[in-house]
Image (cartoon, rainbow, N blue to C red):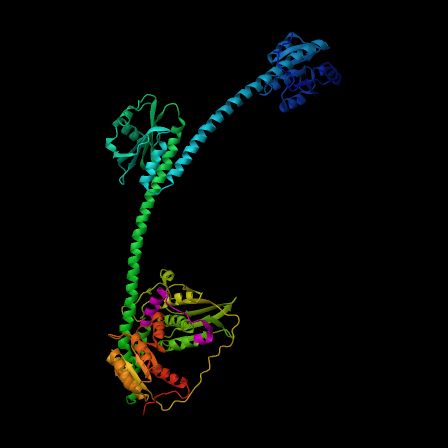
Amino acid sequence: MPLTPAVDERDDPPGSILIVDDLPDKLLVLHTVLEDLGQHLVFARSGSDALREVLQREFAVILLDVNMPDIDGLETARLIRSYKRSAHTPIIFITAYADEMQTARGYSLGAVDYILSPVVPEVLRSKVKVFVELYAMQQRARRQAEERVALAAAEAARHAAEEQSRRLSFLAQASRVLGGSLDAEVAARELLRLLVPEPARLALLVRTDDHGALRHALVQMDDAPAQECDYEAVPAAARALVDRCMQAQGLVQADEAPWLPHWLADTPAAGLGAAAVPMMVGREMRGALLAVTSQAGRWHVTALEELAGRAAIALENARLYRSLENEIEERRQAQAELLEVNRRKDEFLAMLSHELRNPLAPIRNAIELVRRVAPPDPKIVWAGDVMDRQVRHLTRLVEELLDVARINQGKIALHREPTELAAVVAHAVETTRPLIEARRHVLEVSLPPQPVWLQGDFARLSQIVANLLNNAAKYTEEGGSIELRAAIDAGELCLSVRDNGVGIDARLLPRVFDLFEQGEQTLDRSQGGLGIGLTLVQRLVALHQGRVEAHSAGLGAGSEFRVFLPCLSVVEAHRPPALEVHGVQGDGVRVLIVDDNQDAADSVAVVLSLDGHEVKTVTDGLQALACAPVYQPHVVLLDIGLPGLDGYEVARRLRQMPSTRSALLIALTGYGQQEDREMALQSGFDRHLVKPANPMDIGREIMQWKRRAAPGADTRAASP
């Protein structure tokens, strides 16, 4: 009769039997007796080998000889029992002699049987088979238990996956709904419609005001539109649940909702529960969400917390978006106001320059007249030089103010052409030489031996170098040293201006190129200036695709400015266009001056008269148009800012008259921006000069016009 239940043993793997004996003959006998069992036989010839095998695998039964040389069978059994894996493995002692004490000790160590040697094969095989089958039954029971556990785990996992899928699907839909609008009211109503009527019968959304207090509530019931109400109108039990969740800052549940009939009179509250969860962004409380749900389904309760978190973020985003819109609108208005202020500033600078140029023009002309007609008295010469220097200085300040306004408006137009560095430096040095010599500085100029060509505007490049030299001269004590050096590296020009002057404070150095920024000035402001020279340098260098750096070790340590500009690798020889020179009868021409500033008109007239020209002055455009057919001027000096008809219209009408159709029209005005020059050319002017114009420049323009006159043209030369 079998000792095991009727089960299918075909899938049972063979067990392992450990046989321990130090005698090879006995091992061979035991192998012969037990091999018919069909199990895996493992042999060990010492206690140490047996322990090693026990550590490596699990055995159905262990046959252990008592008397062994290194570790006897009893000690080996004790050590085997000390291992967790083999603590309950059956052990059968095989011995040739066993007294009562030895037997008692063996059983105390967990032996299940004693077999005397020589063994009876049938007895040994039968006993071992019992333990092998018992081991197989244990293994089957273990596998069945593991299968049941795995099946239960799989069922639980499937159920959890279904719940998770439903929750994720719900939350995904919630994210789409909440992300569909940046309007807080729309998002709140869509959120409640998502909850009602499934999975919730009723949903309540309460939001805090700007002070953190609960003021207003939004209630969604069935398919009806959400209703607004004051928070105090919410039933006290529902308010208590909301207050509890906000105090706990977490989910709070109630097994019943007795206040449900307050909103749904025909709906019984039995079997329904409520859950409330706060809506928080970080540590800030933004409101609470309450839902009345069925007690049967609980997945939506766990999803409610995450839904409240997403809703809080969505509503916070809507609030921030609304705030951002308001801020953008405020900034747009502020920017519009700043642009208007900037426009008025630019208009003011343009008008200021025009008004300053008007008095400067007659002053400069008067100085030139005094130089020509005054007797050669040293004091008069000295006074004329002083006045000329101051007028030039004031003119430069006005030009710098205008340059800043033009650059800010993007109205600086560079006339780029191949320009040699040596010519630029020579022009800049010549411009600043009076100031350098006046302060008795020593200027050292070092340029590369080979020509250096730049693609840029000659006048603006000269202005960059001149401003740096002027800055070095102003902020260096008299008798100082200024070095201007240039070097080429990898196709880039590095031009530096170094001085041993007052230096730059470390706090000022990062702002040295800011507009109107200057170092500390004494009360007498001996350095002068408006603090815009270096600003012009930086912006003009940037227009030439370069950069400028300022360096100084501190106050009293001097300063160095480095300008980096790209160089040209190949430049063709620059030849000015050839001009045909034709003779013109007589030396002088008839000049008509039109300017509402009588002093400016008279001063220019006197200087031109000294040059041998016949000059007539009028003060407005109508007078100019009236006298032009009779006077028939060769040259018209025309102010643009005239009362009544402006200079543009006067020029257009003069071009339509036969007597002035081919005359030289020169715009002599305080308006000097690029668009003013372009408009002047479009109106018929030949030249555009900015007040205060040098009378020598006016005379030079007239002489060039005479030389370029076509052969045989009617020059209408004036009689001497």
Q: In which quarter of the image is the C terminus?
A: bottom left
155 sits left or right of 178 in the view: right
Does 707 sit above or below residue 25?
Answer: below
Figure quadrant of the N terminus: top right
Extreme-bottom residue of the structure: 720
In terms of image quadrants, where is residue 641? bottom left
Look at the picture and state if 572 lies above or below 204: below
Residue 463 colored in magenta in the image = no
Task: Locate residue 438, reporting x and y percent.
Answer: 35, 77
Q: In which quarter of the image is residue 190?
A: top left
Q: Give the range drawn in magenta.
A: 397-425
Residue nearest the viewer, comparing 628 with 505:
628
Q: Is residue 80 left or right of residue 189?
A: right
Q: Can residue 357 be seen?
A: yes
Instruction: Say if the magenta span includes residue 406.
Output: yes
Residue 629 falls left or right of residue 427: left
The part of the image, by quadrant, that contains residue 304 is: top left
Q: Residue at x 55, y 21 (%)?
A: 147
Give left or right: position of 672 versus 549.
Answer: left
Relative depth, front residue between 70 and 460: 460
Whether residue 282 is visible, yes or no, is no
Residue 395: x and y in percent read 31, 75
- From this viewpoint, which residue is outermost toward the right? 25
* Residue 569 at x, y percent in the picture: 52, 70
Q: Residue 263 in the image: state x and y as whole percent.
A: 27, 28
